[in-house]
Image: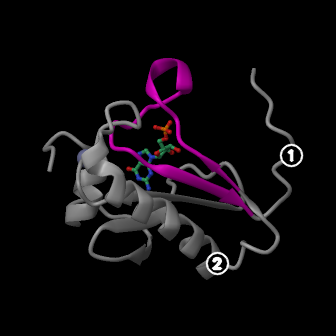
Amino acid sequence: MSDACIFCKIVAGTIPAKLLYEDEQVVAFADIAPQAPVHVLVIPRRHLASLDGLTEADRPLVGHLLERVAHVARLLGVAEAGYRTIINTHHDGGQEVYHIHVHILAGKRIGPMVVR
Ligand code: 5GP
Ligand code: ZN
């Protein structure tokens, strides 16, 4: 755990979040500032800072994380209609929290991806 990391604190339960799913490796919770009717973050319990920096050793965890993203989308009832998944990386990618997370955005038509 990284003491400074807000998502590690959510995993530890020391700051509150609306938990939607958890298992031994990942946690899913509602984004505090939702950008769509459904906006959920899925994270590994283990502190991994960013997509950039993953190594071969992280493959099993990252594979599990992505499979659980699909599972959480089904649990939320949005899988059939569809959803957008996003992983932001570093400054130019818009990453603000340095604990790797997959955004799930759903509940309306998200529309074509626009880069502004
Ligand atoms: P990023 O820009 O790093 O990809 O996304 C970080 C996301 O974390 C943002 O959508 C932001 O709203 C969310 N977030 C930041 N702090 C908190 C928090 O304390 N609790 C929750 N639930 N979400 C947070
Ligand atoms: Zn962390």
- Measured as percent of width and height from the top left, residue 62 is found at 39, 55
Helix, strand or loop at disc 2? helix
Give the magenta range.
Answer: 84-106
The residue that label 1 is drawn on is 111
| Earlier residue among tags 1 and 2 | 2
- Measured as percent of width and height from the top left, residue 21 is found at 44, 76
Rendered position, 115 above or below 99: above
Quarter of the figure that contains the C terminus = top right
Q: Amino acid at mark 1?
A: Gly
Relative to 50, is 12 on the left or the right? left
Res 27 → quadrant: bottom left
Which residue occupies 15% across, 44% down?
2
CB under 8 Å between callouts 1 and 2?
no
Q: How many marks?
A: 2
Q: Amino acid at mark 2?
A: Arg
As for residue 99 lying within the magenta part, the answer is yes
Question: Which coloring applies here?
Answer: one colour
**Mark 2 CB lies closer than 8 A to ligand 1:** no
Relative to 3, is 52 on the left or the right? right
The residue that label 2 is drawn on is 74
Count neighbours of disc 2 (C-alpha within 10 A) and say few if under 14, some if 14 to 19, many if 20 or more: few
In the image, 50 versus 53, the foreground residue is 53
